[in-house]
Image (cartoon, rainbow, N blue to C red):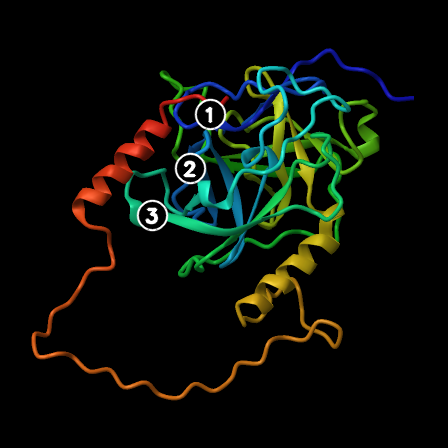
Amino acid sequence: MKRERAARWLVAAVTLASSGPLGCGVDHTGRLVAAIRGGEPAPADSNVVAVVNFAGGHCSGSLLTPHLVLSARHCVADTFDEDAPVICGETDFRDPDSPGAVFVVAEPEITSDPADYRALREIVLPEGVASDLCGTDVVLLVLKEPIQGIRPLEPRLDVPVAAGEYYSAVGFGVDEAEDGHPAGVRKRLDDLQVECSGDQCQFDDIRGNEWLGSGGPCSGDSGGPALDVDGRVIGVVSRGTDGCGEPVFGDVASRSEWLRAQAIRVAQLHDEPPPDWVPCDEANPCPVEEPQEPVEHHLDSSCQITSSRPATSSGLLFAAAALGMLRRRRH
């Protein structure tokens, strides 16, 4: 028989610039929270990216392929009562925000440089997914242009999470262990442990495709990964209690079929081979690259080189917008 819990949960997204957690919560009750509490700067974890939503807040995510980022659904979709704690079976999602409002930043910290903001092509949810937040708080973000020069993370799809195994948490959230509760810098905390997984947790507010961790994430770490000892993604930060406690993660292995199917679809969409964790086969053949005719390039007589970066005035406007976004709460 499952037990009820009294903890109040918070969603782990950070408002584009508040130092506190978002005001929607969970009843493993609580609000969805998520920065790595007490973590260290992690510039080397370049495959953990920031997800910036101009509709209201910032989160974290895992780069799974050059075009594909795994994050939390609540980072791109509001719930019907953003100020209420999350209660499983009662807290429902609205439709996702427009892909045009959401950007990915693949830098060690969230910047105000418009060149660092990568636009989305689409937001992908599992087909037929329910509106209830609990058990559905994962999303895939498809980028318009690939992120090059960064080795993507590999999700662990064939081995389920086990109680007692160690994990590391990485994200861009609020660090409540530091004065001023800074956010927006990628941080990492190691040697955390899985407390329980799915039905083994025996709590009404943890679904069969979720697991409970010992700590790490805070506001803004939502959508960020839990990494196993081999550096593979085993969880997606969903929610936790006040004070960055008892984080709940969306399980990755239980979503293996969906993740593989989307990785193949996106690879075919861009005429690219799928990642190593989705091998091609007869049912899902790799795209065949057509030979390209050589293209001759000619310089005009002026030899003028134009910049692909926005003009200074546009850049300043974008920077101002980004900084302003990081200072207002998502409602």
Toward the viewer: 43 or 312? 312
Q: Residue, x 50% and y 45% (percent of image)?
A: 99
Q: Is residue 21 above or below residue 61?
A: above
Q: Are marks 3 and 1 in contact (CB under 8 Å)?
A: no
Mark 3 and mark 1: Cα distance apart in space: 27 Å
The image position of residue 73, as x and y in percent, is 61, 37
Q: Nearer the viewer, mark 2 or mark 1?
A: 2
Identify the residue under disc 1.
Answer: 38
Q: Is residue 4 above or below residue 189?
A: above
The image position of residue 120, as x and y in percent, is 48, 50
SS type, badge 2? loop
SS type, badge 1? loop
Identify the residue under disc 3.
Answer: 116
SS type, badge 3? helix
Badge 3 or badge 2: first in the primary sequence: 3
What kind of residue is marked 3? Asp
Q: Residue, x 62% and y 23% (percent of image)?
A: 240
Q: Is residue 118 above or below residue 236?
A: below
Q: Is residue 136 left or right of residue 316?
A: right
The number of numbered discs placed on residues in the rendered structure image is 3
The image position of residue 208, as x and y in percent, is 80, 35
Q: Which mark is residue 192?
A: none
Badge 3 or badge 1: first in the primary sequence: 1
Q: Quadrant of residue 210?
A: top right
What kind of residue is marked 2? Arg
Q: Residue, x 84% and y 32% (percent of image)?
A: 199
Q: Is residue 183 above or below residue 105?
A: above
Q: Quadrant of the N terminus?
A: top right
The image position of residue 294, as x and y in percent, is 35, 88
Identify the residue under disc 2.
Answer: 186
